[in-house]
Image (tube, helix red, strand yellow):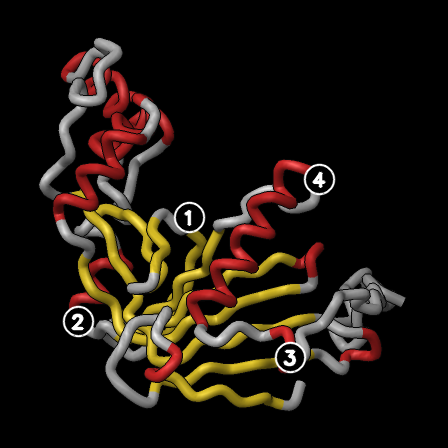
Amino acid sequence: MAGATDASGASDASVPPQARRVDYAGEGLDESQVAESPYEQARAWVDAAVLAAHERDDVPEPTAISVATVDASGVPNVRTVLMRFFDERGPGFVTNLGSAKSEELRANPSVAVSLTWPSLYRAIRFRGRAQLVGRSEVEAYFSSRPYGSRLSAWASDQSRPAADRAELERRWQEVLARFPDTGSDADVPVPDFWGGWRVVCDEVEFWAGRANRLHDRIVFRRTGVGSLADPSAWSRSRLQP
């Protein structure tokens, strides 16, 4: 029984919690269904997830990605952000360039990123090395953000300690006064300390849930020079679940 206690009222940690059993009713991913390149396959799945998010309530953030890095001590670190770039060069995200993830990527560009859609029984894993996104791309993306999102890039000293919530609110009021909303995309400039990272992939794995835990895992591994959209740069194989 989960949460069991002894006579003293202490919890018995040896008693496992009651597991929730769900048999995945996914469509799977047969070799005959896999696109020729990892980009084509990933693009199809990302587009399907974005479409599903408009049609149902159980795909709330279809472009949310988990980004795993390694800190200076060699300890893994992971966080969830939104994928803001995705083309044949790889997936990318924006961040403060002084944040913990940026500092870790500068010291060790090895990175792993995953997209997971539990309700669709699908996931994609990207592994490779991080590369800074070009400034022109960053500026173009920044100008597309809502006013409040542009403002928060200035207000937050990302990953640094804050005394309390009041400090964040004070910083917000300061940048609100500094950059009033004029209705123009240029009313809040791109901070010098803000940018983006892209994953230059060496491996892309597609996971599709199936009944009885006999899931499909199809992996593309880099074998040559070329983009995610170049079939000749990749080999494809199946992994056991």
**Label 1, label 4: how many angstroms apart (C-alpha)?**
19 Å
Q: Which residue is mark 4?
A: 56
**In the displayed image of the protein, which residue is found farthest to the left?**
192
**Label 3, label 2: how many angstroms apart (C-alpha)?**
41 Å
Q: Nearer the viewer, mark 3 or mark 1?
A: 3
Q: Secondary structure at mark 4?
A: loop
Q: Which residue is mark 2?
A: 107
Label 2 Cα crowd, 10 Å radius (few <14 / some 14-19 / many 20+): few
Q: Is residue 222 visible?
A: yes
Q: Looking at the figure, which quarter contains the C terminus?
A: bottom right
The amino acid at mark 3 is Ser
Label 1 Cα crowd, 10 Å radius (few <14 / some 14-19 / many 20+): some
Q: Position of residue 230 (x, y in %)?
A: 34, 75
Question: Decide: marks 3, 1 in contact (CB < 8 A)?
Answer: no
The amino acid at mark 1 is Leu
The amino acid at mark 4 is Arg
- Earlier in the chain: of badge 1 and badge 4, it is 4
Question: Decide: marks 4, 2 in contact (CB < 8 A)?
Answer: no
Q: Which residue is mark 3?
A: 32
- Earlier in the chain: of badge 4 and badge 3, it is 3
The residue at 48%/71% (across/down) is: 125
The residue at 60%/42% (across/down) is: 60
Label 4 Cα crowd, 10 Å radius (few <14 / some 14-19 / many 20+): few
Q: Is residue 223 above or below residue 141?
A: below
Q: Nearer the viewer, mark 2 or mark 1?
A: 1
**Label 4, label 3: how many angstroms apart (C-alpha)?**
28 Å
**Label 4, label 2: how many angstroms apart (C-alpha)?**
41 Å
**In which image quadrant can residue 167 be found?**
top left
